[in-house]
Image (spheres, rainbow, N blue to C red):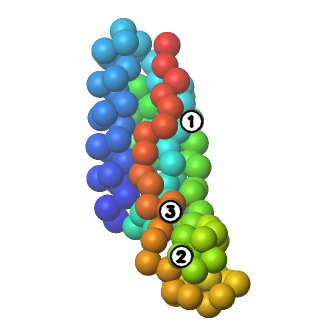
Amino acid sequence: MHELALLQELCTLAAAVAEERGASQIHRIELRVGELGGVNSEALRQAFAVVALTAPWQTAELQLDVVPTRCFCPHCAKAFSPLDVIYACPQCGAISRQVLQGRELELVALEVS
């Protein structure tokens, strides 16, 4: 479960930022996770439950924003949401090679005091 190692690294980064700002308490951490990011959202939540047993995470809340996959069809010149793992345009059937979103893994916000 690489999600635990990933979350521990994100929490280390967040704790360093909080310390830089002179904060001693972390209230909320917000992450954007793309559907194609190779990260299981539920496993990430479970990993956070483990990390939340230690200070300064005991009262922290994890907010996960899952970013849906969006592709671009060069024939139709429009963005679309693929229906399955083959990124075929629902209008013309052309296979898209351009993924616009869905690969994100970002620390978006950190609420500290």
Q: Which residue is mark 3?
A: 100
Q: Residue furthest right?
A: 91
Question: Which residue carries the number 2 mark?
Answer: 74
Which numbered disc flags the more N-terminal residue, 1 or 3?
A: 1
**Which amino acid is tagged 3?**
Leu
Dot 1 amino acid type = Glu
Measure the alpha-carbon separation of dots 1 and 3: 29 Å
From the top left corner, tell me how far across and down residue 2 is, in percent.
Answer: 32, 61
Kindly identify the residue that appears in the image at 58 percent across and 42 percent down: 63
| Secondary structure category for the residue under label 1 | strand
Frontmost residue, 25 versus 66 = 66
25 sits to left or right of 82: left
Q: Is residue 67 above or below residue 80?
A: above
Q: Is residue 32 left or right of residue 76?
A: left
Circle number at residue 48: none
- Local SS, label 3: strand
Q: Residue at x 50, y 80 (%)?
A: 96
